[in-house]
Amino acid sequence: MTPTPHRYFVLNKPANMVSQFVSSDDVRLLGDLDFDFPEGTHAIGRLDNQSEGLLILTTNKRVTNLLFQGEVPHKRTYWVNVGHIVSKETLQRLRTGIPILVKGGVEYVTSPCEVEVISRPEILSKHQNETWENVPNTWLSITLTEGKFHQIRKMVRVAGHRCKRLVRASIENLTLGNLAPGQVQEIQEEEFFAALKIENWFQQH
């Protein structure tokens, strides 16, 4: 019997939705989307309830290990809206590493990462979580290779700013593109792994 080919999807996850199909809590689920996912589909590299943007879904259970637990770290880029103007000194603090509390109340210094001030991304729709236009605010692009629990929110908070909106724009070369919030796009297997720079997948299969 020939095994069923794996399938791969990218979603622009809207805010106020969890990255799962089942929950005991009264929350919006991935199954509420207007898309017929095949049995066995699950999310990879989850986004929290309030965060938005690029979410990978697949029927291939090996992707988690290949993407997030391999020897080569994979870059993830986020668009982050914070209150007030971010100074050059604060940008440098964020880039070089900043202490945050992680599991167990342990202090952890984040790894160096890329942080730049950007214009508001044009593809984003307006959202109630976003800072009002007449209130000083800054959009940042933050690219990192690690993903501690609520890491970016904690980083900007320690640096003296409140994270108002957090959107994952890309994982390596897999990007949000022009997907509207709640929209799903299926990707072919070879394109999927090439974009994520998981090059040894096809050498093993």
Image (tube, grey):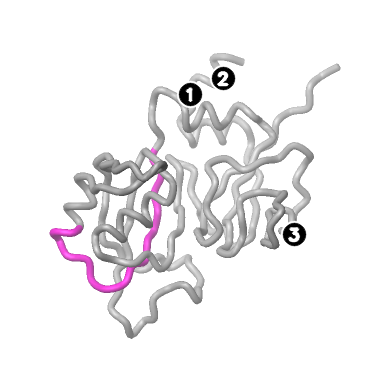
The residue sitting at 70% across, 62% down in the picture is 26
Give amino acid for label 2. Answer: Phe
Lower position in the chain sequence, tag 3 or tag 2 = 3
Lower position in the chain sequence, tag 3 or tag 1 = 3
Label 1 secondary element: loop
Residue placed under numbered mark 1 in the picture: 199
Q: Which stretch appears magenta?
A: 75-90
Residue 84 is one of the magenta-drawn residues? yes
Give amino acid for label 3. Answer: Asp
What's the distance in space between the residues labelled 2 and 1, CA to CA? 7 Å
> Is residue 72 or residue 154 the one in the foreground?
154
Task: Say whether residue 58 is left or right of residue 121.
Answer: right
Q: Quadrant of residue 119?
A: bottom left
What's the distance in space between the residues labelled 3 and 2, CA to CA? 32 Å
Q: Which dot, 3 or 1, sits closer to the camera?
A: 3
> Is residue 158 or residue 73 the one in the foreground?
158
The residue sitting at 31% across, 54% down in the picture is 155
Task: Say whether residue 9 is left or right of residue 157.
Answer: right
Label ID, residue 34: 3
Give amino acid for label 1. Answer: Glu
Considering every residue shown, the one lying at the far top of the view is 204
Q: Are marks 3 and 1 in contact (CB under 8 Å)?
A: no
- The C terminus is located in which quarter? top right
The percent position of residue 22, horizontal first and vertical second, equals: 72, 49
Q: Quadrant of residue 166?
A: bottom left
Residue placed under numbered mark 2 in the picture: 202
Q: Are marks 2 and 1 in contact (CB under 8 Å)?
A: yes
